[in-house]
Amino acid sequence: SQVQSFTVILLYMYCESLSIAHLLLKDGQFPITQNVTVVEGGTANMTCRVDYNDNTSLQWSNPAQQTLFFGDKKALRDHRIELVRATSQELTITIGDVSLSDEGLYTCSLFTMPVKTTKAFLTVLGVPARPEITGFTKPAMERDIITLTCSTSGSKPAANIRWFRNDKEVHGRKEVNATGKSFTVRSSLQFQVDRRDDGAAYTCSVEHVSLSNPYMTTEVLEVHYAPQLQIEPSLIIPQEGQYFKLECVSIGNPIPEPVLWSKDGGELPDIERMIVEGRELTITTLNKTDNGTYRCEASNHLGTSSAEYVLFVYDPNAVAPHGPDHALIGGVVAVVVFITLCLIIVLGRYLARHKGTYLTHEAKGAEDAPDADTAIINAEGNHVHAEEKKEYFI
Ligand SMILES: *[C@@H]1O[C@H](CO)[C@@H](O)[C@H](O)[C@H]1NC(C)=O
Ligand SMILES: *[C@@H]1O[C@H](CO)[C@@H](O)[C@H](O)[C@H]1NC(C)=O
Ligand SMILES: *[C@@H]1O[C@H](CO)[C@@H](O)[C@H](O)[C@H]1NC(C)=O
């Protein structure tokens, strides 16, 4: 009977352990999945696992509740959907060439009694199209108001657009429109163009989670503007007998050409010493008869502009021979003035310090004053000295 009871106990323990195992199995027998994010056109990997399974079947179904795979059996005719692995612990499938319409909740079911399910959300990112800049017709005229618009379609979520003018960020006005499941994003820059915009590069940059590097498009502006002229002489103090050149520096778009030279409101004197070559006027040997007002003029289709230069030919005898002596005298005078100034400053500071001690005595005097008026007078005197002191320090 001892043996019998021992057997019963053993049997009981065996049964108990079985049911514990069964409970454990039941507890761990549930499907697990993860949300998936994939870029449009890419491949989504959908995995469903069951850590403790007893050969119960697994199934994947799409957001429309259509079964895709039941175990290793393909249920939906869609060549983009393929089986990767079907074991009792895992059912993995891939969806290739994913489109935005594939987005949604996918269900993995484990056919226990009752059926256990888990859901995975498939997020599909819409890749933005390369941006396009519109609204600029070359060339613009100075002071025109233009609107540059950069647009990109097909992004999901909506892409971000940034503008740069010669690499420096500028801010545009953004507009987002939904087209189907994706977005069309536009950003507009409106401004009045001026000559500094001629050749300026406006870059539109599209940033998006699906792009490792932003997409960029650049528009280089061309702005037409009236000429702007300036005469640059080759010498500051032109002297008789020297070689001298005037250059008519011109900017403008289109480049103003040709440059016309005139003297004192008339034609240039017809002398061999004077040569005009494009925007340069050369006088090979200056003569005092060359004195006068020189003018250069140029135009483009936006206007005409001119610049003037008054030539004064110095007599070399008045400037050159004693030139160095003058410079020397000038230098000596400057040094003397400098030293004198230094002396004054030093003296001034010394006096000021001296007055400073004097002041305290006076202030004491003010305290000791017999009546308020004297005190004020003393105080005023004090104030005057304080100002003097200040002046010395300047
Ligand atoms: C999965 O995605 C859905 C929908 O976007 C969300 O509600 C849920 O919290 C996500 N689950 C996890 C585990 O991230
Ligand atoms: C300047 O011109 C005058 C007349 O044209 C001429 O007599 C004179 O010699 C010239 N002076 C110099 C320095 O060339
Ligand atoms: C020309 O320059 C000389 C100095 O070289 C001056 O004496 C003379 O007055 C000037 N003439 C004119 C017309 O400006």
Image (tube, rainbow, N blue to C red):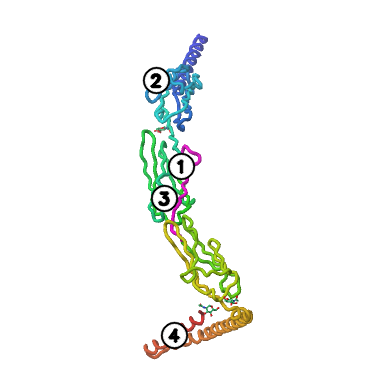
Q: Which residue range is magenta in the image?
A: 208-227
Mark 3 surroundings: few (<14), some (14-19) or many (≥20) residues within 10 A:
some
Residue holding disc 3: 171
213 and 283: which is toward the camera:
283
Residue holding disc 2: 115
Whether disc 4's CB lies below 8 Å from ligand 3 is answered: no
Residue 145 on image: x %, y %: 38, 52
On the rendered structure, is 198 left or right of 327? left
Would residue 156 be seen by someone viewing this image from the given angle? no
Residue 304 on image: x %, y %: 43, 61
Q: Find the distance from the CA under tag 2 to the CA under tag 4.
A: 103 Å
* Mark 1: secondary structure: strand
Residue type at numbered disc 1: Glu
Would residue 73 be seen by someone viewing this image from the given angle? yes
Residue 361 on image: x %, y %: 48, 87
Position of residue 176 relative to residue 164, above or below, is above
Q: What residue is shown at x 49% (from left), y 16% (from top)?
A: 13
Residue type at numbered disc 3: His
Q: Find the distance from the CA under tag 2 to the CA under tag 3.
A: 55 Å
Whether disc 3's CB lies below 8 Å from ligand 1 is answered: no
